[in-house]
Amino acid sequence: FFATSYLKFNFYDEHRYIYPNKEQNAVSNGRLKWKLADSPRVVSEFSSEVDEEWIPVMKYSTITFCVPFDAFDAYADKFIIELEGGYKAMIKLMEKQSLFDRALRTITFDPYSNEGTERNEAGGYQAMPELAAWHVDRILGFYRKPPITSRYVSNKLLYPSFINSLLPDYQIAVTVHAWVDQLEKYDPSTTVMQYIVEDQLEMPANDNMKEFVLQISDILVFDFLVDDHDRRAEKNWVMHNGLYLSWDNGLGWHHGPFGSHSCIDILCGSNKWRTYSGVTETNNVPCKKTCVFRKSTVDLLHDIGPNAKEHEKLGWRLKEKLRENEAELFPLFHFGIYYSDESCSEMVRYESESFFVGLNERAQKLLSHIDTCISKHGADIVIQSS
């Protein structure tokens, strides 16, 4: 009881329910009023067995209803759908729809000429990084994301209107996300910092505290691998059944194939943690980075890291998973549109192969950071068993 109470009242700063059971069961869309099935099928746990059930349904089953979804604080265009059999899911878009070919250059990424590159239209079109991140999650065996897959849907399904009915039918690339109920938002408090990012790290007092710290560590490790900075702004710290999820990686791969020099700061956690450490936008004080990691996560990083055989590295594995499971959209990263540099004067695409190479480099940078932590704090503090 003490451990549970301590976690609730000291390790969390904010708690609220999001997407509760009856939320969005009735969806208003202008003139359209649609009610989901009284008991729609949703995901309550994440496992390979759940994937085997949901992925074929989301990829191939008939969509019986589709309406826009206005989430509480989201930027991306989303749609709630119901599939044959009563399965409830959500759709995100791959790219901005246009009647004309955008004719953007595809270039080789160069860390000097492309310094300051950022993903254009990242807020509205998040399907590409969501799908890639889901495959990374499954490769790592984390199972912190609900089932996600890709498919094409008709423009007339997503945008039903009289004008659209007169236009030719065309297919839109999307991701389909299994719906999860009973999500809770828990922002980690500054109390957690003494166990994970402080200069003088303390050992958690009990197994409950240690598991909580290691969950946060795993989430930040994953965010670094997929270049997702969104949790810095106290967003998406979402739990389900007491487990932190890698919820919403729609802003992943924000800085191109290799990321920027600042990406390692993802390991510093939220802005609240940075402010508590005295970090501001102007004082150039370095933020304190995570220096506690789950042993099984570190072992896994070594298995897929720079010393692994080529076909065992993370980038190679992701490429093969996309080739096998998302063949219609392979290699996927061609959907990413970026400003070529910090001037934001030109939008480009980067050669897709560089994204797989970049994933390997980020795994290597993460292992180098862990080695630095070990030299500072010792392996007994930095590497902790579950």
Image: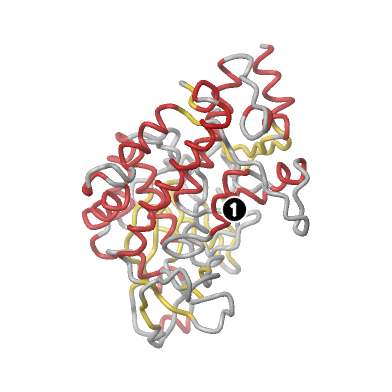
Measured from the top left, where is residue 256 in percent x and y?
46, 65
Q: Quarter of the image containing the N terminus? A: top right
Q: Position of residue 213 (x, y in %)?
A: 58, 28
Write the residue at 50% across / 52% down: 249
162 sits to left or right of 306? right
Q: Position of residue 328 (x, y in %)?
A: 25, 65
Label 1: how many Cα within 10 Å (few below 14, some 14–19, many 20+)? some
Question: At 37% from the left edge and 71% from the top edge, which residue is drawn?
Answer: 172
Q: Nearer the viewer, residue 376 or 346?
A: 376
Instruction: In the rendered view, tell whether residue 103 sits above or below residue 70.
Output: below
Q: Is residue 231 above or below residue 327?
A: above
Q: Which of the 4 quarters of the picture holds residue 147? A: top left
**Residue at 75% in and 58% down:** 281
Task: Choose top left, top right, bottom left or bottom right for residue 93.
Answer: bottom left
Q: Residue furthest front?
A: 375
Residue under the point 53% across and 69% down: 118
In the image, taking residue 319 as reference, residue 363 lies left or right, namely: right
Q: Secondary structure at mark 1?
A: helix
Residue 261 lies in quadrant = bottom right
Determine which residue is flagged by label 1. Answer: 230
* Residue situated in front as seen by the camera: 209 or 112: 112
In the image, what residue type sits under mark 1? Asp
Looking at the picture, how far across and down is residue 163, in whole percent? 47, 84
